[in-house]
């Protein structure tokens, strides 16, 4: 097999794995994320809970 096709298969595999990983992380963050409303009206993620204490002082 030509070396170009071997490299193309490697890149295709990497892109598939990274896409599946991204979808898994995206799904978990949507499932595990909080439902608190942020400044823009969009839900906040759990890691931004420490910002609430800063915002509450204003």
Image (spheres, rainbow, N blue to C red):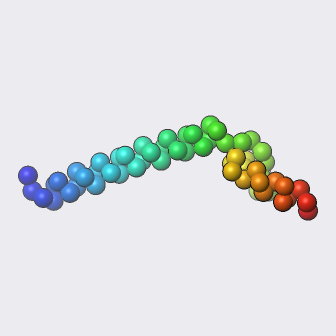
Residue for point 91% across, 60% down: 57
Extreme-top residue of the structure: 31
Task: Judge whether 44 appears above or below 30 on screen.
Answer: below
| Residue 42 appearing in the image | no
Report the side of 1 relative to 14 (left or right): left
Residue for point 42% across, 43% down: 20
Task: Judge whether 58 appears above or below 24 on screen.
Answer: below
Extreme-left residue of the structure: 1
Residue for point 78% across, 45% down: 36
Report the side of 13 relative to 32 (left or right): left
Relative image position of residue 15 (x, y in whole percent): 35, 51
Relative image position of residue 3 (x, y in whole percent): 12, 58
Q: Quadrant of the C terminus?
A: bottom right
Q: Which picture quadrant has residue 54?
A: bottom right
| Residue 40 appearing in the image | yes
Task: Judge whether 28 appears above or below 56 on screen.
Answer: above
Relative image position of residue 27 (x, y in whole percent): 55, 40
Task: Judge whether 45 appears above or below 32 on screen.
Answer: below
Residue for point 76% across, 50% down: 49
Extreme-bottom residue of the structure: 58
């Amino acid at each position: 097999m030509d070396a170009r096709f071997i490299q193309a298969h490697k890149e295709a595999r990497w892109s598939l794995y990274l896409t599946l990983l991204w979808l898994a992380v995206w799904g978990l963050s949507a499932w595990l994320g909080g439902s608190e409303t942020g400044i823009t009206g969009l839900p906040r993620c759990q890691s931004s809970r420490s910002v609430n204490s800063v915002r509450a002082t204003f």
